[in-house]
Image (cartoon, rainbow, N blue to C red):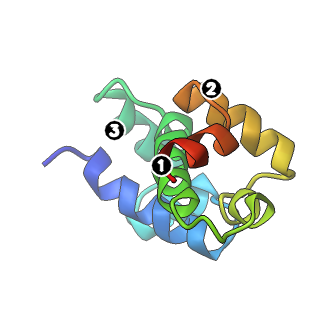
Amino acid sequence: MAFSFKVRPLIAEELAQGPVRVDTVAARLHMSRHTLYKKLRLENLTFGRLLDDVRREEAVTLLKDLDRPLVEVAERLGFSEPSAFCRAFKRWMGQSPGAFRQAIA
């Protein structure tokens, strides 16, 4: 099994609790941050990219709840403000969160 498959669920759990810190994820895997980076690099991945991937997947799930405000989605995903979330979502999906919601409604 790829190492990143162990890291992804930990990132998701940390994200649900608040800000995600690489040191915390590494500690949960009983390794240093350097070792975590090294193992991800062997899969041509970075921690930031995995965090982005998990955030994107969570965003899609959260936005399917049409009653959930965008402010809450942005906060849950660890963005400092809704505009930062909207920019990231547009980069990930090629459309705004509002357009995404209209397309699935």
Q: Which residue is mark 2?
A: 91
Name which residue type carries label 3. Answer: Lys
* Residue 12 percent coordinates (x, y): 48, 63
Q: Residue at x 27, y 51 (%)?
A: 5
Marks 1 and 2, how far apart in space? 19 Å
SS assignment at label 3:
helix
Q: Nearer the viewer, residue 86 or 53?
A: 86
Marks 2 and 3, how far apart in space? 27 Å
Q: Is residue 80 left or right of residue 1?
A: right
Give the label on residue 16, or none. Answer: none
Name which residue type carries label 1. Answer: Ile
Q: Is residue 31 left or right of residue 3?
A: right
Vertical relation: 14 (above or below) 51? below
Vertical relation: 13 (above or below) 64? below
Q: Is residue 90 left or right of residue 43?
A: right
Q: Nearer the viewer, residue 62 or 34?
A: 62
Give the label on residue 104, or none. Answer: 1
Q: Earlier in the sequence, mark 2 or mark 3?
A: 3
Residue occupying the far left of the picture: 1
* Residue 61 percent coordinates (x, y): 47, 59
* Residue 97 percent coordinates (x, y): 66, 43
What crowding class fits label 1: few (fewer than 14 Cα within 10 Å), some (14-19), or many (20 or more)? few
Give the label on residue 39, or none. Answer: 3
